[in-house]
Image (cartoon, rainbow, N blue to C red):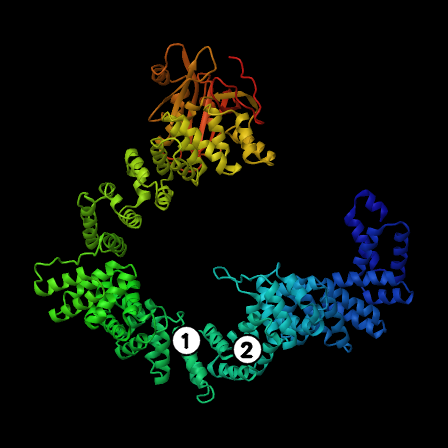
Amino acid sequence: MQALGEAGYWQYKEQLLRHTAEQPAAAVVELLHALEDSEALTDIGLVFDAAALGDVSTLVRYLLQRDLRVYAARLLDAVVRRRPVKDVVDLLAVLEADGRRHEADGVVRDAATHRSPRDVLALLTRLEELGEAPRYLGVALGAASLRKPQAIAALHQQLTDAEKGAMAVTLMDHASRQAVTVVAETVALLAVDTVDGAGLRQIVESFVRRRCELLWQLLTHLVPRSRPAVAGVLRLLGQMLPPDSLAPLAQRTLDCLPPLKLEEGEPPREGVDILLSAAAARESAQIADLVQALGDQRRDAADILVKHALNRPPADAARTVTALLSTGTDEDRLIRLAIAGAPGLEGVLALAGVLEPTTQRRLRSELVLSAGACPAFHAVSVVGALRRRQPGWMAQALLEGVALRHEDLVAEQALELHRHGQRPYAQLLLSAAATVPGTAARTAAALWEKGLTEDAVWLWTRHAQMSSADQLAHAICQSPAGCVTAFIRCCVHTVAPGRAAELINALAHRAHEHLALAVLSEAATTPPAWILACADALDGNGHTGQAAWLRERAHSPGDAPLWPPPENAAEAASATSRLYDMGYSAHADEMLAHLINLSSTQDTGSSVPMIGLLSLLNAIPARARQRLLTGIVDLPDLVGTATPEYLAHLLQFLTESPALRARLFALPAHNQSGHVQALLTAMDTLAEGDPVRQEILDASVCVHNMLELTGIARRTLAGGKRQTARRLIWHALHRRPLTDLPPLVRLAVTHNLAGRQEIHTILRQIHPGTEHDILACLDEAFRPEFHLQVPRSGHRSALVIPPHLHEMISLHVLQTLPATACGIIVGPRTSRRLTNCQHLNPAPALPVLLGERHPVPRTATSALLRDNEEIKAVYYALSSNVPYPSPADIARVTPSAKHYLIVTFHDTPTDSSPDKIETLRAFTVHGNTIQEKQVLVAPDDTPPFDLQGRKHKRPSP
């Protein structure tokens, strides 16, 4: 064997081994000893593998008789791995006949541990035929439970499919005894793989029976593995745990377990909700015991349990209610939880219907009343319940509850009842709404807005009959502007003249003179006798002028003014403000005209534009002036379209109105750049030291996009307003975080608004103790504008582009979108400076622009060059995310262009934000060699900065 192995004849060696294994047992043992002496461990294994395929029983007996247990164990292990299950079981029979129980148990244990789940199932099936079947099955299942969780789950599935339920239960019982982490992984697999959940139930039952004190540890290990498995275990625990064990688990779950997201598109569920929803399926007595076990300290958990318990069939829910009442549970709490847990209004009514009519009469009436008052049950469900012919007490209680809702919901319910032809129920609802204090008038207003004018008039009339003058005045003041006239009409034509005078007086005392005037105007439409009686009552309250107007209307209606006059200028101003606030533009304009006449100003109408009202607003109180400005003009939109002179005039007028200035300076969702630019232009017309200038700067630096703010500063500089741009940048340095400042810092330095050291000093004063962050901000501000994202052969000296050329290239690319922009950059022949750029539109093909073999580019570009100028660089806009010359570009580029610039952009930019350009990269091409050059945007007369922000010398020409 050694000679064959050294010569490389492995096949002959294996044949020799197989033939040797077929020799008598003594020869095999002698060979094993010889191999062991020569330390040929691999050959020993091959001998055992070969022997496992022969007469195993004879060899095993020989080895065991001579107490060679190590050899016997290795031989049995080879048999388990290489022979079919049938042969393994036959070997077990031989060992059992020889009384070798220890070796037989080892064979069973090895087979259950190392064979596939299907082979283990076959092994278990054959073990049932042996005399010692229970012992062998226990050994096999115990060994199988020590395998990996995946193998345990697969074996359980095999046993379940083969209808070996008892074996599956025993397997799960053994598996539940492993370490908690292993049990958790097994549970997670069973929760996903088993269809009916039998395996999950079996292992959880075994775990609860043997290791109940470790339940929380099991749940903790399950949370990061499988949220559905946690939910499945909680459901099983809710069904099987006794109340004394379930209550502490519910408390701990409520405090510590995070919400579980079980399925996509559904909101997460609380673990305690899953646990107690399963526990709610128990008998009513057990639910009551569990509520008592939870106690008042965990009232929230008990409420979850009761809510789910009452969400069962009506008969079961009624028994639960009876059991809870017997333990002293509050009725109001039960009502609240029954409504919260009910699947719908029908469930609540069904529960109320099965409650005891004598001993639980109050409970069922309050339950229906509370269900009607619950806005969760919409109008359609209420109509559907009423159409099913509920008992009279139930229908009345339901509608009384609906009447307690918000007035809009009551009106919606009445509209739905009319739509389904349930007018008697609608009248019953309105009768109930009329008795609700404080809401009858608002409910009538909601009915009016929904088109139920007859019902609204009926409810207003009932309210006017049942209320005092002060109550009517309060209700009129709270009514919406769209129906207050109808409400006043109902009141005037319902009450007596004396109460109408009291109503006018009450409205005047409440500072609602416009409503008092409206009541007077409506009173003038009544019969003359009623008008005269009301005028006499007004005389007694001190309203002599308005009483005289009423008498004039009663005797000669055509000669008196259509609208009653105010008593004085203050009343007229207050009425104007109120009328504008409520939408009565015509009456407000009449009051405004009266004020203008008192102030000797020009008259105005209801459609006066904002620019014409500016000269009149001084005659109006501040409150009315703000109403006018707010109601007539949308100030934020006005900023973008008005001229700077008009904005300056408006700013001066709003000096005493900080709230309106705040609206004026509020940045809109769109076109923030134009809004801020207009405000900065108007700011320049204000005097130095005006506090409004500071407010404009505060609003300007709040632009969401920092690149837009940088664009605003650039355009301000382009307009020749360096001082304004400097103030804007300085204000941003004080207000914006350091992470937003690099673009503005770079702009300030490159346009000579400040030096790097000056900005460094200012930032240290503004942000003390953040030197590291300040240096990072400055380094970011002066880093190169390209990103090293593609392979390249190296760097040369930096290519310095003046800021004005960078701006021209950026604007050209943006204005040309979506077409491709192209152009040339020129400079003196005797210098490396870049002085000007020329746009070529439409962009020619790249070979036409750069190739020396084409006569067109020399003719086309020579006309663009001045004397002593040459093409320094060619720029081209690409839509690629990684700008780099392609092989075709390398073949076309010739030394006629010194540099090749590629401009790319990430998003489609806008005119207001030209800083959306992503990269500007420069390359030099010599043959097939591409070298990238650092691009620095810096003035020609100042040295650029390197990557660390240090100045370095400019290369000589």
Q: Position of residue 387 (x, y in %)?
A: 32, 79
Q: CA distance from mark 1 to mark 2?
A: 24 Å
Q: Is residue 195 visible?
A: no
Amino acid residing under circle 1: Ala
| 209 or 540: nearer the viewer | 540
| 297 or 27: nearer the viewer | 297
Q: Quadrant of residue 540?
A: bottom left
Kindly state the secondary structure of the residue where label 1 is placed: helix
From this view, report whether residue 915 is shown above or below residue 368: above
Q: Nearer the viewer, mark 1 or mark 2?
A: 1
Report whether 332 appears left or right of 539: right
Who comes first in sequence, dot 1 or dot 2? 2
Q: Mark 1 — residue?
A: 371
Amino acid residing under circle 2: Ala
Report whether 669 appears left or right of 309: left
Kindly state the secondary structure of the residue where label 2 is placed: loop
| 474 or 242: nearer the viewer | 474
From this view, report whether residue 820 is shown above or below residue 485: above
Report whether 831 appears left or right of 621: right
Q: Which label sits on residue 281?
A: 2
